[in-house]
């Protein structure tokens, strides 16, 4: 396969601006084909198809999945809809990429990973930070420091996301009036996540901190084991975990900042690596990486500025290239099982105040 054919399931805000716009660009560059789009709002699907010069609108997701020309589906839905939709996509023999998180429960995630393997198709999760050029640089630096011990042993990792302006002045998506209720799958939760307060906290966890947990796993290259967690409703959280001998903290709150406030700091005995990731919809920034070193004659700080490239575009490019057999996925579903397991454990041990 040199030019994969892709169908789109979901044409809401993120489906349009963070995904379809990038695949349309890749289509115009001759890297892929777009078979068509579908949405529970037919009028929206038609308007979006016209905007992005897509000739076909499927009347339903069943029609999309029955199209033998479609190699892969970009499925951009709420997390509660991922399990039933992805299961049907995989059963139809199509590769798929979804938004994060994978699903609501670990057993669902494991079932889908096994199904993708059985069907011989790709299953990717939209952890676009793994495609950020600054994050890629940081991953290589951290791996090198851990191997060489130039900065001594790794002691702690602190992942902070206080949020803020994540839209970064993005253009308004197309929209249409809704005249009838849109059906949605009932969300599924981990065992023990039963009360409304727990479920609100879990929704906050998977919507926001799934990214930070996944990024920690990616940069560490090993799985975290949560030991303690607290939530202040669905507005703030902190989690303490371990990855081997490394202590890991994931924390943050819903801030009212004008900026996007997200840092991941790897603290070594003789220095640190700090990554400042940009707001998700900022197309003109990549992560900034700062390395602090303690030397015999004092301290030095070196700042790295990776080439500017929007991580959502690079994710789309990476998925197309993976479909064409040109490179591996950066966020294959099997590696994201760690995230689902960690988030299940976090909500099961969490105190909610």
Image (cartoon, rainbow, N blue to C red):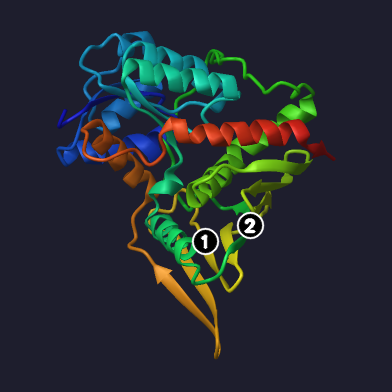
Q: Residues within 10 Å of mark 2 (few under 14, many from 20)?
A: some
Under tag 2, what secondary structure?
strand
| Residue 259 in sight | no
42 up-or-down from 18: above or below: above
Give the vertical position of 56 relative to 227 (above or below): above
Q: Residue at x 52, y 51 (%)?
A: 220
- The image shows residue 236 at horizontal and vertical percentages of 73, 46
Give whichever of 108, 319 is nearer the camera.
108
* Dot label at residue 276: 1
Q: Is residue 306 left or right of residue 213?
A: left
Let me know if residue 176 appears in the view. yes
At mark 1, the secondary structure is strand
Q: Residue at x 34, y 27 (%)?
A: 122
* Residue 207 located left or right of residue 134: right
Q: Position of residue 217 (x, y in %)?
A: 53, 45
Q: Is residue 63 above or below residue 32?
A: above
- Which of the pair 187/60 is nearer the observer? 187
As drawn, the residue found furthest toward the right would be 353
Mark carried by residue 49: none
Q: Position of residue 346 (x, y in %)?
A: 70, 36
Figure quadrant of residue 95: top left
| Residue toward you, 238 or 142 | 142
The residue labelled by disc 2 is 158
Quadrant of the image occupied by residue 65: top left
Considering the image in quadrants, where does the C terminus appear? Answer: top right
Q: Mark 1 or mark 2: name the one nearer the start of the chain.
A: 2
Seen from the viewer's position, the closer of residues 180 and 67 is: 67
- Foreground mark, 1 or 2, reads 2
Question: Residue, x 29% and y 8% (percent of image)?
Answer: 66
Examine the rendered structure and indicate whether residue 153 appears above or below residue 169. below
Task: Count the marks.
Answer: 2
Distance (Cα) linking label 1 and label 2: 12 Å
């Amino acid at each position: 396969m040199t030019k994969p054919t892709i169908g789109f399931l979901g044409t809401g805000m993120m489906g349009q601006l963070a995904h379809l716009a990038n695949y349309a660009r890749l289509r115009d560059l001759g890297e892929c084909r777009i078979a068509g789009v579908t949405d529970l709002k037919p009028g929206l699907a038609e308007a979006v198809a016209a905007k992005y010069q897509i000739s076909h609108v499927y009347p339903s997701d069943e029609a999309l999945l029955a199209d033998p020309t479609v190699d892969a589906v970009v499925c951009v839905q709420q997390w509660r809809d991922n399990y039933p939709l992805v299961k049907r996509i995989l059963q139809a023999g199509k590769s798929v990429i979804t938004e994060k998180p994978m699903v609501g429960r670990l057993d669902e995630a494991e079932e889908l990973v096994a199904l993708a393997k059985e069907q011989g198709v790709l299953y990717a999760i939209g952890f676009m930070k793994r495609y950020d050029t600054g994050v890629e640089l940081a991953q290589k630096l951290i791996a090198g420091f851990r191997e060489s011990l130039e900065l001594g042993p790794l002691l702690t990792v602190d992942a902070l996301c206080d949020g803020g302006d994540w839209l970064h002045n993005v253009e308004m998506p197309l929209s249409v009036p809704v005249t009838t209720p849109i059906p949605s799958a009932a969300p599924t939760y981990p065992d023990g996540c039963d009360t409304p307060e727990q479920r609100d906290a879990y929704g906050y966890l998977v919507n926001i901190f799934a990214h930070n947990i996944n990024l920690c796993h990616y940069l560490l290259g090993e799985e975290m084991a949560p030991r303690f967690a607290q939530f202040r409703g669905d507005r703030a959280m902190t989690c303490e975990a371990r990855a081997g001998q490394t202590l890991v903290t994931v924390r943050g709150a819903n801030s009212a900042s004008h900026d996007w406030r997200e840092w991941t700091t790897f603290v070594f005995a003789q220095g640190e690596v700090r990554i400042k990731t940009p707001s998700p919809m900022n197309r003109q920034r990549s992560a900034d990486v700062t390395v602090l070193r303690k030397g015999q004659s004092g301290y030095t700080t070196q700042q790295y500025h990776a080439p500017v490239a929007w991580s959502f575009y690079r994710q789309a490019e990476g998925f197309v290239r993976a479909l064409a057999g040109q490179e591996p996925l950066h966020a294959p579903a099997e590696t994201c099982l760690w995230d689902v397991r960690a988030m299940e454990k976090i909500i099961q041990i969490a105190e909610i105040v």
